[in-house]
Amino acid sequence: MILIEMANQYRSAPILPKPTNSEALEWVKQKVGDDLRKYFNDGFYGDVTQEIQESRRRFEKECATWHQ
C-alpha cells in the first residue's frame, strides 16, 4: 500500500510525460524517488515550474490576441 501511495505522488507531480502506474512503481523500486525528491526539494524545481507557467501564460495571451 505504501508503494502505491508513493507511486501516486509521482503520478501527480508536475513532470512530463506523466508516468503510468507501473512506471511510477518501477521508479519507487529503483529508488529513483530519492533523486526526484532531491530535485523537487531544491530551488531549481521551483524556478523551472514558475518559468513554465509564465511561458504558458505568454503563449495563451499571444494566441488569444493573434486573430484580433
Image: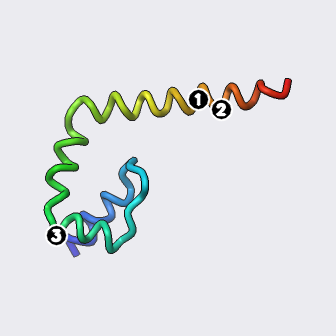
Q: Is residue 20 left or right of residue 42?
A: right
Is mark 2 in CB contact (under 8 Å) with mark 1? yes
Whole-angstrom CA distance, mark 3 to mark 1, is 37 Å
Residue labelled with disc 3: 29
SS for tag 3? helix
The x and y percentages for residue 36 are 22, 49
Disc 1 residue type?
Arg
SS for tag 1? helix
Disc 3 residue type?
Lys
Label 1 crowd bin: few (<14), some (14–19), many (20+), radius 10 Å: few
Residue labelled with disc 2: 60
Residue labelled with disc 1: 57
Task: Determine which quarter of the picture holds residue 3.
Answer: bottom left
Q: Is residue 55 left or right of residue 1?
A: right
Q: Is residue 58 left or right of residue 18?
A: right
SS for tag 2? helix
